[in-house]
Image (tube, rainbow, N blue to C red):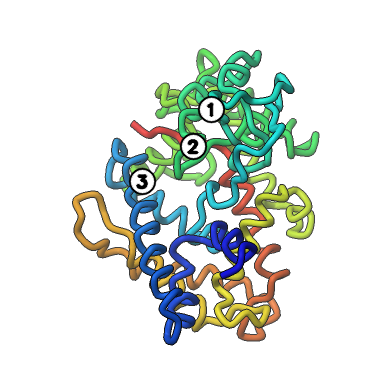
Amino acid sequence: MDKTGQKWHKFLPRAALVGSLLKHCKDHLQIRQELREFMNEMKKDSQKTQEDLKDEDSVVREWYIRRKSNAASVGLTHRDLLMRHQENEVCHICRKEFEACEEQYPCRICDKVFHKDCVLSLKELHPSHLTAIKRANTSVGWSCPECDDLSLLLKEKDLQSIIDTFDEEINPKGGQITFEEFIEYKKKQYGRHVTEDERKQFDLEFRLVDTDGSGTIDWWEFLNFQAKTKIASREQAELVHLLTEKEVMMAKIAFSRLDINNDGSITEHEARKVFDEYFSCLNISDGRKNTGSETYAKHALERAMSLDVKEMGSVTWDEFLNGQAQYIIAVRPNMTELK
């Protein structure tokens, strides 16, 4: 493998690479060794992700797995695309170069890197960044304040609509939405009382919106939550233009891993093979095999093939990116530390 190949290999998605590597391992001892090394790396990555989420309960861990089932992020972490420690790298805030001893805090969405102190010194910084930035160099990653704020992508009328909903429709006491007020808001949306199962789902949703884990939803948190709905209603082509270069690159790599024969389209057979292999590698916290892996793989397959808008039996790159854009943008905000 030449230097270019070695460099490219670093950026390949961990889990989804298995299928294509196996195909090339029949007669090449050197590649067999690479496969063994790759499998060890993949195992370490899975263990690292579990370590990062060890304090979360089982419901949240399974939600995180389902979140990663999105075809745009199969087998990928933001670290797969980081080019760290480049010469003359500067902090996006203070514009000073990083010293050799200084730790860089990269955004998982854009290409900017920061000093931690520079970020935490920003005025009107949401408290959630105090914890979220600690994950910048983990498999979970961190979104910088700009990428974390989806309201920057809103149109003026959409922003006004969200303001009216918060101030008039919900009108939370003290300016913070409690869980009971959140449930009342949901009842208005549904036009009826919610079931016990729905209440449990809303409890998880509430905690996901409550990014600082305070037990209430403030204006900024509610704004980001509602912004996802507004953004998703736009034309797909418009959303594609909102993606960062890193997001498009990650989507392209994910697409190439699903496109096993590299013919420019993804068939159902190819997608099933990749998702089955990926989810079979995920274990639940006590070390037992994840019994829900087949279900996750099935859902991921259905979502991937639903992008075949021309109904040709395969998904092209344009269909893939157009269909995934809203989901890629929706996961920009930092993950909450659910309690």
Q: Nearer the viewer, mark 2 or mark 1?
A: 1
Give the structural element (helix, strand or loop) at label 2. Answer: loop
Q: Kindly check if marks 3 and 2 are in contact, taking CB atoms under 8 A apart as contact.
A: no
Instruction: Report the front residue among 169 and 202.
Output: 202
Q: Mark 2: give few (<14), some (14-19) or many (20+) Cα within 10 Å.
A: some
Q: Which residue is mark 3?
A: 48
> Which label number is shown at residue 137?
2
Q: Please indicate, yes or no, whether residue 195 appears anywhere in the rendered image.
A: no
The amino acid marked with disc number 2 is Asn
> Which of the image's four quarters has the N terminus?
bottom right
Q: Mark 3: give few (<14), some (14-19) or many (20+) Cα within 10 Å.
A: some
Left or right of residue 244: residue 288: left
Q: CA distance from mark 1 to mark 3?
A: 19 Å
Locate residue 46, reporting x and y percent: 36, 53
Q: CA distance from mark 2 to mark 1?
A: 9 Å
> Which of the image's four quarters has the C terminus?
top left
Q: Nearer the viewer, mark 1 or mark 3?
A: 1
Locate residue 168, reporting x and y percent: 63, 25
Give the structural element (helix, strand or loop) at label 1. Answer: loop
Considering only order in the chain, which callout, 3 or 1, is on the residue closer to the N terminus?
A: 3
Q: Mark 1: give few (<14), some (14-19) or many (20+) Cα within 10 Å.
A: some
Q: CA distance from mark 3 to mark 2?
A: 11 Å
Instruction: Report the front residue among 135 and 58.
Output: 135
Considering only order in the chain, which callout, 1 or 2, is on the residue closer to the N terminus?
A: 1
Q: Which residue is mark 1?
A: 103
> In this rendering, is residue 237 above or below 88?
below
Q: Please indicate, yes or no, whether residue 8 appears anywhere in the rendered image.
A: yes
Locate residue 74, reporting x and y percent: 50, 61
Q: Kindly check if marks 1 and 3 are in contact, taking CB atoms under 8 A apart as contact.
A: no
